[in-house]
């Protein structure tokens, strides 16, 4: 038979096939994890902290100065 053209022994190309498969599945898993992180991060408040949000609310007139000062004290 002509299945083993390069003589007897372990076919060397099979090692590379296994490595390519590991690389492929590692990339697929990494892309899934990266995508999930991106989706969950997009729902957050843009990286603003609670004090920044309180400042914005005070600037828009949603809260009074007393409420703003109380929030600053509570957050500090």
Image (cartoon, rainbow, N blue to C red):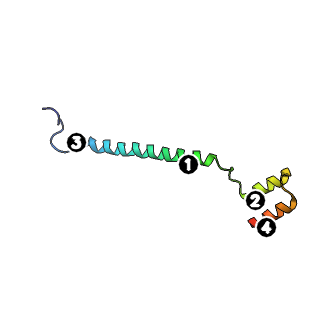
| Sequence-earlier tag: 4 or 2 | 2
Residue of label 2 = 51
Q: CA distance from mark 4 to mark 2?
A: 10 Å
* Of the image marks 1 and 2, the number of the one nearer the N terminus: 1
Q: Tell me the residue that label 1 is attached to.
A: 37
- Looking at the image, is mark 4 or mark 3 nearer the viewer? 4
Q: Nearer the viewer, mark 2 or mark 3?
A: 2
Which one is nearer the viewer's eye here, 26 or 10? 26
Inter-mark Cα distance, 1 to 3:
41 Å
Disc 4 crowd, CA 10 A, few/some/many (<14, 14-19, 20+): few
Pointer 1 local density, CA inside 10 Å: few below 14, some 14–19, many at least 20: few
Q: Nearer the viewer, residue 56 or 64?
A: 64
Q: Which mark is residue 28?
A: none
Secondary element under disc 3, as helix, strand or loop, is loop
Residue at screen point 79% across, 67% down: 73
For the residues labelled 2 and 3, the Cα–Cα distance comes to: 64 Å
Q: Between 41 and 69, which is closer to the camera in this rendering?
A: 69
Position of residue 9 in the picture relative to residue 40 (left or right): left
Task: Say which mark, if any, is on residue 73.
Answer: 4
x and y percentages locating residue 3 in the rendered image: 17, 34
**Relative to 22, 69 lies left or right:** right
* Crowd rating for badge 2 (residues with CA inside 10 Å; few <14, some 14–19, many 20+): some
The part of the image, by quadrant, that contains residue 25 is: top left
The label on residue 11 is 3
């Amino acid at each position: 038979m002509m299945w083993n053209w390069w003589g007897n022994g372990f076919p060397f190309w099979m090692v590379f096939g296994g490595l390519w498969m590991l690389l492929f599945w590692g990339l697929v898993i990494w892309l899934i994890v990266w995508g999930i992180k991106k989706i969950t991060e997009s729902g957050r408040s843009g990286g603003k902290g609670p004090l920044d949000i309180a400042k914005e609310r005070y600037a828009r007139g949603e809260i009074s100065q007393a409420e703003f000062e109380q929030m600053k004290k509570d957050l500090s």
